[in-house]
Image (cartoon, rainbow, N blue to C red):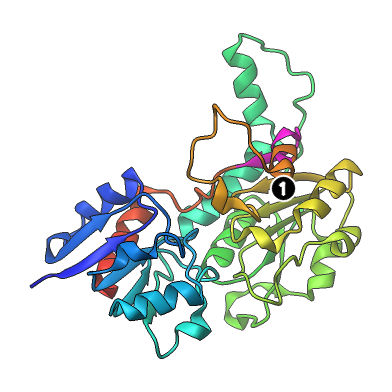
Amino acid sequence: MSYKVIFFDAKEYDIESFKNAEAFNEFDIKFFETRLSPDTVDLCSGYDAVCVFVNDEINKEVIDKLQDFGIKLLALRCAGYNNVDVKYAEGRICVVRVPAYSPYAVAEHAMAMLLTSVRRIHKAYIRTRDFNFSLNNLTGFDLHGKTAGVVGTGKIGRIFADICKGFGMKVIAYDKLPNESSGLEYVSLEELFAKSDIISFHCPLTDETFRMVNEKSIETMKKGVVLINTSRGPLIDSEALLEGIKTRKVGAACLDVYDEESDFFYHDFSNHIVSDDTLARLISMPNVIVTSHQAFLTKEALANISETTLKNI
């Protein structure tokens, strides 16, 4: 008898990639678009395993319910696990994840946002669609010769550093556990903040990294610094970022993640009023680019996520 697996927060691209996976037919899988939370956990009754994504909420209440239902396994189809109370889960339910689905996808997206921002490509695209071919206010700057600070030097961070080097940038790095064989120049976080023209975050969300970008740390950065976050929203204090942008301390921000994204990202609000004033103000800023946690979204990454998740289960 095949294992019964329930998927939460499943989108069309998830369903397609899993159905194309070699091991798909070995399982009895049910896809739900709703997120897992204390309000929806009762849907898990009768299943053997639960598969979740970045915005599902797996707290003590949910874990207790999963244990009551006899769920053996919680499978994350992502690398990050800050949305899971892993300490409470220990001894109660097995938790697995996909640590490396495509580090190239995320690193390349970070660079794509950086290039879009500093060369005003998004603004030029909108103009030329209206047959406006003026170059006024589209002046950017060379990446060559600039200093890129990479916070977190796992696979994604190292690949992003390599991309930066390909543009002729000087790269400095910070990691709590430096990878001495990476060939990167490691400095303290304070030195990285002070010397970098561009700072890109590729670290997990922990108690130590929570709001590492805040009012005080922004004050230590170069005037006009560009911040890139493709990791987790709460690494950056959004209100402090807004203030930094308004005072011209922060020259630009490229955000694929947001502190309170779970209520908005992956959903269509084009015909609604967005109730999050901070998110609305960020999006309204001319030097801010927001994408909806899509850095992972390539065909290669989806295929790897599907295959690894099913192998984990």
x, y percentage for residue 306? Answer: 29, 60
Q: Which residue is mark 1?
A: 144
Task: Name the foreground residue: 112 vs 52.
Answer: 52
Q: Amino acid at mark 1?
A: His
Q: Residue at x 74, y 18 (%)?
A: 135
Task: Name the foreground residue: 211 vs 108.
Answer: 211
Q: Is residue 281 left or right of residue 44?
A: right
Q: Is residue 203 left or right of residue 15?
A: right
- Residue 173 vs 87, above or below: the answer is above
x, y percentage for residue 21? Answer: 21, 57
Q: Residue at x 49, y 48 (%)?
A: 294
Q: Is residue 27 left or right of residue 77?
A: left
Whether the magenta-drawn stretch holds residue 299 is answered as: no
Q: Element at badge 1?
A: loop
Whether the magenta-drawn stretch holds residue 284 is answered as: yes
Q: Residues within 10 Å of mark 1 (few under 14, many from 20)?
A: few
Q: Is residue 98 left or right of residue 17?
A: right
Q: Quadrant of the N terminus?
A: bottom left
The segment highlighted magenta reads 282-290
Task: Name the foreground residue: 5 vs 114.
Answer: 5
- Residue 162 vs 289, above or below: the answer is below
Q: Quadrant of the C terminus?
A: bottom left
